[in-house]
Each structure stands twice: as C-alpha cells, then as structure tokens.
Image (spheres, rainbow, N blue to C red):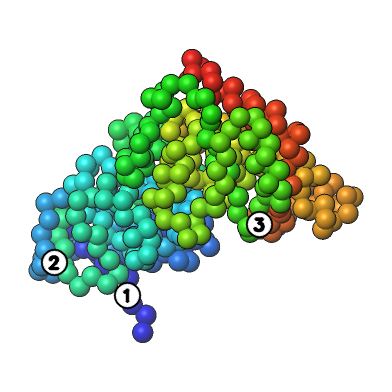
Amino acid sequence: MEKLPPLMYQVADVLKDMRPGMLNPIYARKRDKEALKNVREVSLRCLNGYEVAPQCTINQSIPALVFSTGGYAGNLFHDYSDILIPLFLTAYHYHGEVQLLVTNAQTWWLRRHRRELSQITRYQIIDFDNDSEVRCYSDVIVGLHSHKEFNIDPLRAPIGHSMANFTQFMRRSYSLKRDTLNQIGGVLKPRVLIIARKRTRSFTNINQIVQMAAETGCEVVVKEPGFGTGMAEVANIVNSCEMMIGVHGAGLSNLVFLPENAVLIQIVPYGKLEGIGWYSFGLAAGKAKLKYIQYEISSLESSLMEEYPKDHPVIANPDSIHKQGWNAVKNVYLIQNITLDVKKFRPVLIEALKLLQNQDDM
C-alpha cells in the first residue's frame, strides 16, 4: 500500500502564504517533470475555527524547512545546483537555528553531505516521510529558493549571499586550508588537477596531456573523483591545487573547493556546446572569484569522427541535432571522448599559468 504524503496543518499564520492542498513541487527544478517523478508531495490542510489541530508531541521554537533529496540527487552537479546551493540560500542565514524535514530522505545522501548539512542546522534531521511525531513550529518554510543553474543572484538572496559565499561555505564545511591563493603569494610550481574519468567524456591521450603540462612547469595530479573517493579526500585534493582542468560535466562541480584566484579550464566537447558550458560552469567560476578559461575542441579532437562520416549532420551540422531537443544533444554529444590536441592546448595552459603569476590582476 502506497504511503500517504507527509501532512502539515496550517494554524494561524504559520504558513500564511500557503494554500491548502498538495505543495508539490518542493524541489528546486519545479518545472522538470522528469526530476519531479522522484519527489514526494507534501500535503497542507488548513484548519477552520471549528477544527482542532492534532496534539503536538514535540514543540519547537525554531523554524522548520521542508525539502526533498529526490529528483536528480546523487549526481554531484545536481546535488549542488538543485539542493545544496538552494539550501544554503534558504537556510544558512538562520545560523543553525532551523530544523530540516526531508522527504525522499536517502541515508547515503545525507551521510555523503553530512558536513555541509551540519553547517546549516544544529538539530536532528528528520525523515519526514517516516516520522510519526506531531511536530509544531512557529514558522515553516516549504521548499528551497533557487536562482540559476549552479549559481546565485546576490540581488535575490536573503542577505546578499553570492556564489563566492557558497564556495567559502563549502571550504569551511571541509575545514580546507586555503580560501585564496593570495595567502601563499606567487606560485613557483603550480599544482594542476586533471579530472580524468574512464567513462564518457574521457581523455584518450591522458599521458600526452600530463607530459605536456609537466613540460610547462606544472606539478600534475590526475584524479577521477567519485570512484572509491570520499568527499573529504576530493575536497582536500582540489583545494591543494592552483588549477583544475576537466571536461564539461565530468567533475567540474568540484570547483567549489578551489581557493579563490585559482584557474578553472573547462574542455567543451564538440557539438556547439559552448553556451551550455559557459552557463553551467563559466558563470559560476567567475562569481566564485576563480579565473576561467574555456577550450572548445574541434571535430578532429572528438571520438565522434570515428563514429560518423565528416559530412554527417552530427559533424557537419550540429544545429540540426540541437533542433531535435536536449535528449538528442545529450545522447550524441555528451557521450563522446576527447583526444586533446596538446600542441593546440599548450598556449591555453600557458595563458592559465600567466593568470596565476599575475597576482596583481587578482
């Protein structure tokens, strides 16, 4: 038998802006039907003057915040964009004096992000779907505020928080050593993290890339975050680096751990994805006070050339694929691998090194 959705009662002005009924969606992607399939609804019932509210079993003088860890939770980009950034926006200014009521609560997700959550609330996190208590609060916030994809608009934030404030929050959550590169002065041998994964959007010539980067004077670290690597380990590795290089959608959300003034280089796959790349990570990098470079590969650097003739629309006319919608784009251009032209990329890396050396511009 399917469980009934969590039920809240409106008494006086506790939920004064809410109307009775189902309060779906409480997830940041409020118009994404696919994501909302995995988000439980919350029901609100308003009591009239003749009805009596259930007897409270727990009274709290702090506000409560109701949100979901369903949707696309588990994908790290969506963990940030759909949950953690909106959660920071909605609740961080309570300075821990707020209780979280979570629908679609997944133990592994709460454990994965326990450090961030402990900075949001000092109180027990409640699995709202399976809670038998009648909890009474003076104030209840239903759902999370969200401004942009993986970004924050300070003009709309409750107390003017920015993306730089969020990345600072992330570094503090993991007790990272560096907030900014200015704390260590000039960088003699920059440490560069190359995010190299073995699935789609992988580098097929990683050894050549590492050799070229080393020849320019970099200390190179190659890592695939997420596979047998805890969040704390990833956070410390990223924070120890002055530069991070990765392919679009393949671990770049770890930019939240970079110290300010570090450099992020996004490798954008072939297929007219430059706008998506900029919107997803370029804007956020700038707002997080990082230096940002976007490198867009040519068709000759793409594994798509091995799968399609050069006159095929996938190669010759990417616009025609984009006109078929996001699923078509995703199923073609986000499953390619990349053989980076190291001669063409070398000047890009040198430009990034100059950005690091020019501390006065930071």
Q: Would you say residue 248 is visible in this rendering?
A: no
Between tags 3 and 1, which lies in front?
Answer: 3
- At a point 35% along the width and 36% down the height, the residue shown is 177
Q: Which residue is mark 2?
A: 53
Q: SS of the residue at dot 2?
A: loop
- At a point 16% along the width and 67% down the height, the residue shown is 134
- At a point 56% along the width and 36% down the height, the residue shown is 219
Rendered view: 217 above or below 276: above
Mark 2 or mark 1: whose residue is earlier in sequence: 1
Q: Would you say residue 186 is visible in this rendering?
A: yes
Label annotation for residue 200? 3
- Between 317 and 297, the residue placed more toward the observer is 297
The quadrant of the picture occupied by the N terminus is bottom left
- Between 234 and 20, the residue placed more toward the observer is 234
The kind of residue on which mark 3 rests is Thr
Where residue 346 appears, as percent x and y from the top left, is: 70, 31
- Which of the 4 quarters of the picture holds residue 221? top right
Label annotation for residue 4? 1
Between tags 2 and 1, which lies in front?
Answer: 1
The alpha-carbon separation of the residues under discs 2 and 1 comes to 19 Å
- Between 230 and 5, the residue placed more toward the observer is 230
